[in-house]
Image (spheres, rainbow, N blue to C red):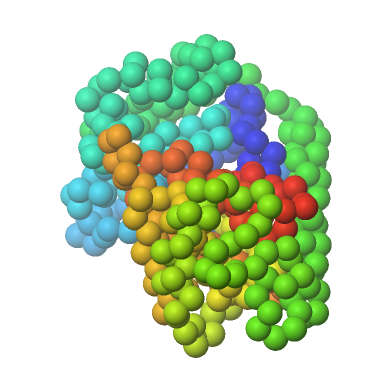
Amino acid sequence: MSNTGRFTEQQARYYFKQLIEALDHCHSKGFAHRDLKPENLLFDEKYNLLLADFGFATAMAGKDGTGRLRTILGTDNYMAPEIHSKAPYIGSSVDLFAAGIILFIFYTGHPPFNHAKATDSYYNLICMNNHEKFWNFHGRKKPGGMSFFNPQFIHLINAMLAFDPTQRPSIAEIKAHPWYNGETPTPERIFQDFTERKAAVDAEFEKKKQQQELARQQQAGRPANAAFTGVGARFRDLIIKQEGLDDILIENSLEAMQRVESLKLERTAPVYQEVGSKRLTNYYSSLTPEETLKLITVIANSKCKQVELMPEKFKVRARIPGKEESTTIDMSVYVNEFASVVEFSKKEGDYFEYQRLITEIRTQLGQVENPNTQTESETA
């Protein structure tokens, strides 16, 4: 989905049904998964869905046999509200809550909210039963507006993501729902469509591999301590001077540059291990980790109100105040076999604002590092 976009409604239904069948099997054996998320869904060679990573799985009966679980674990964005509130919970119910989030992502290409908490501006609408406003918000960004969403799909999501776990449907009720029983593609059609998707993903990974190899070659051919030599950018007199940069970037760079130029980054950057979709979100640079850290500090200062530099961790934290909540992202600099890597992660706030910001930062990094090459702006 990061490379080839959201699923069609029929494709979303096809894979949601496979996910529900997998959960039904687990729950019938007495186990809850407790860490459902897209990263834990795999494909076999025929593009059937495989449910993976049972590291957090546990018996649904609980340690005391009451059927209530109490351990707070999972992945924050997919946790049910009762887990966030540290209340005892039912394993099957929290699994189905996460499955509802995954279905929404299948259908739209993005999550329905950041966290299932009353303080989350989007999930609060669900908590207050203001579903119409919730869907109107998401419909504004969709082709055709609200007509993008099937009313039966809306009804199912509203039920699965209910704040009160007793109001959520069981697996049997989900299987009886009209949307669940709608039309799906044939396995042959799925195989054809996803073979094409895989070809696009493979092409993207090959492109990334070539970029990393080019960055490695550029890095190997640079003279020692020649900051930005050979990649079209340099720090000079505490100012980045580069065609294509906005004046505001230069103006806002002075204070940041004075901070980072005095740093002695003696610590060697840790080796970066690529995991899952992060490789699609992050930025790869032929600069040294020290130079990359300086550059993202400058760019962050041009775009964010509050920027914290943590040189001992090779990290920059940026915060953007919003109308309802602030968005905070971390940008950590690592090195892999070929290049320096800027790894983006959202600490808090609006998911869409986070995606917008890292897209801008990635684009700006590309403009500074190599203004003659068109940079990618796609993120996961």
Residue lying at 58% horizontally and 62% vertically, measured from the top left: 240
Residue 59 found in image quarter: bottom left
Q: Position of residue 177 (x, y in %)?
A: 45, 20
For this view, does 165 lie left or right of residue 178?
left
Residue 70 or 352: which is nearer the viewer? 352
Q: Position of residue 368 (x, y in %)?
A: 65, 57
Q: Residue at x 54, y 21 (%)?
A: 142
The answer to whether residue 91 of the structure is visible from this angle is yes
Decide: is 241 above or below 191. below
Q: 224 above or below 110? A: below
Q: Residue at x 80, y 67 (%)?
A: 214
Q: Nearer the viewer, residue 285 or 138?
A: 285
- The image position of residue 361, as x and y in percent, is 55, 51
Residue 44 in view in this figure: no
Left or right: where does residue 146 sit relative to residue 279?
left
Residue farthest toward the front in the current orientation of the protein: 237
Q: Point out the image quarter for the N terminus.
A: top right
Residue in front for this viewpoint, 168 or 339: 339
